[in-house]
Amino acid sequence: MTATATRPGRSGDALPGGAALPVADPATTRRAALRLIRRDGRAVTLMLALNALAAGAGLAGPWLLGRIVDTVRSGGGVHTVDRLALVILACGLAQLLLARYARYVGHRFGERTVARVREQYVDRALALPAAVAERAGTGDLTARGTSDVTSVARALRDAVPEVCVAAAQALFLLGAVVVLDPLLGLCGLGVFSGVFAVRWYLRRAHGAYLAEGAATSALAELLAATAAGARTVEALGLQERRTAASEQAVGHCRRTRTRTLFLRSVLLPAVDVAYVVPVVGVLLVGGALHGRGGISLGVIITAALYLRQLSDPLATILFWAEQLQSSGAAFARVEGLGQAPRTRTAPAALLPHPSAEPSPALPADDRIEVTAVHYAYGAGSGSPAADREVLHGVDLSVRPGERLAVVGPSGAGKSTLGRLLAGIDAPRHGSVTVGGVPVAALDPAALRRQVVLVTQEHHVFLGTLRDNLQIAAPGAGDAALRAALAAVGADWAAELPAGLDTELGAGGHRPDGSRSQQLALARVVLADPHTVILDEATALLDPRTARHTERALAAVLTGRTVIAIAHRLHTAHDADRVAVMEEGRLTELGTHDDLVAANGAYAALWNSWHS
């Protein structure tokens, strides 16, 4: 029912703090991850237990191989070697089955957790006030809901089980070397020589991956805006300018990705060297001890095999540690959506307030009062444009049941006033109230019962015609849905092949602009608010259809407050009163006849349009 326009080329008006939407800090991200783990704690416990058993079974092979070497050197028989080989085979099979089942449990945990992350993201995105979502930009929301959530999903689905398996194997292998011989165990600790490279990497990786995610969001926003406004870009000859902006965004995105690639190119070779150091140390120290009769050859071989095997789990941990930096930054962006404002506040106060509660006050009546309102887009963002007001001291009172037309030249502030009346934005100074309560402070559910804004933007959602209508009234029956369509003159709906069950969008019926707008108006009828704000709501309809739809709406909205923002002045002719906006100020207010007789700005508009 409500819609907001996307301004081509805008990468998202930055909220205070330097980001279009908040990004969760590391502590908040860790707490969110722990909450997800605790919600499925039984599966995590089972996964850890299975991984420990699998790692324990994997220790048997090298130890038994060392026993075989010592047995052969001491002249043992073939029967003993065969028996030990069968035990190695049995332990290997047990490790395979335990590790496979552990991964199965881990992947199921990951898929359930990813489903929770996706559902939570959708809930939070839908709960965003329209002004916050608009300032964030479609690119940022889209990038967080697609590539970032996918990165988190990959980490939860794959990283958790893989890291658990690898960590258990690494701990058991290191412990086994220490048990074999403490001195060889000290050599095995040489594997931690790579910790310096890891620490160097971790100090830089989180910020680098956050910058990469932000650059990806900006690029997605720019491309989406350019694609949506392709016809405008072509009509105004802006191709070169948009191409240059796109190349600049691509270049910035490439630089952030090159930065993370550089960090990986330093980390990975340094860690590869760290894998070789302990094996070399064990062979050298073990050879010296064996020459003095301190340990057997079998012990040296077993320790070397353990440390050689250690490279695989450590490589897995390192790989996922690197991936988890990217996924951690993605999770911080996804989780940051929970810190976005949930209540409608003035632009100067658009800061994360996750604990803010909606005002408990309810409007005493349906009267709308606009008192000394000033407004500037981007106030509080630090932008120079924030000081350029688009509304200057507007005063207006709208009586319940009144039909008010707001007219004026383009750029006069009509749509901005409509946004304030609908509670999408709050005034910089002054107040906009309904029944004595600030409109922007109302809880979203309460606001929808009070005021509905319909703009010239139109949205058709994937699903059936019934689904598209029941967005406004989930409990509405077929009779109510058909009545709403009839009220706005959508006679074409009765001719659809499956009626209300007809699929709309890709692969189904594709409504044109006028039909999409009629769907939006039908949602208004179903929502049944006491005040309807029509901001060029019939702009995409041809004059005859628009007139028919407006007459149908007039019959349906009898007794309700209707505020119509339009360039077609026949709407003003039918209204109870007309408000004239010029350069952000309310310059005239009265009936059509009175304003025409006054021979002022409205009379000039009327004469120009009528002629």
Image: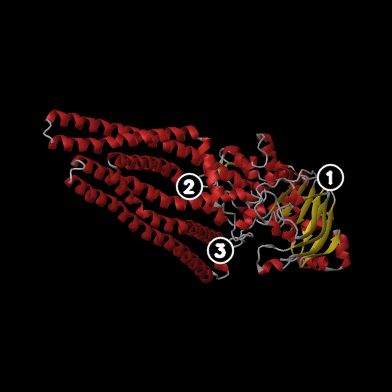
Q: Position of residue 322 (x, y in %)?
A: 41, 52
Answer left or right for 123 relative to 302.
right
The amino acid type found where label 3 is placed reads Arg
- Tell me if mark 1 has few (under 14), some (14-19) or many (20+) residues whose alpha carbon lies within 10 angstroms of its own: few
Between marks 1 and 3, how big is the CA–CA gap? Answer: 45 Å
Secondary structure at badge 1 equals: loop
Q: Nearer the viewer, mark 1 or mark 2?
A: 2
**Circle 2 crowding by C-alpha within 10 Å: few under 14, some 14–19, many from 20:** many
Q: Is residue 484 above or below residue 427?
A: above
Q: Nearer the viewer, mark 2 or mark 3?
A: 2
Q: Indicate the quadrant where residue 429 lies.
A: bottom right
* Tag 3 residue: 231
Depth check: give the residue in front, 72 or 124: 72
Residue toward you, 247 or 551: 247
Q: Are marks 1 and 2 in contact (CB under 8 Å)?
A: no
Label 3: few (<14), some (14–19) or many (≥20) C-alpha neighbours in 10 Å: few
- Kindly state the secondary structure of the residue where label 3 is placed: helix
| Marks 1,3: beta carbons within 8 A | no
Please tell me the numbered disc located at residue 466.
Answer: none
Task: Please tell me which of labels 1 and 2 falls first in the chain.
Answer: 2
**255 relative to 384 in the view: left or right:** left
Tell me residue 403's x, y (percent): 81, 52
Q: Identify the secondary structure beneath mark 2.
A: helix
Residue 19 position, x and y percent, is 59, 59
Label 1 amino acid? Answer: Asp
Mark sitting on residue 365: 1
Q: Earlier in the sequence, mark 2 or mark 3?
A: 2
Marker disc for residue 152: 2
**Left or right position of 344 against 373:** left
Q: Which of the colour schemes (rainbow, by chain, secondary structure, one colour) is used?
A: secondary structure
Cα–Cα span, label 2 and label 3? 36 Å
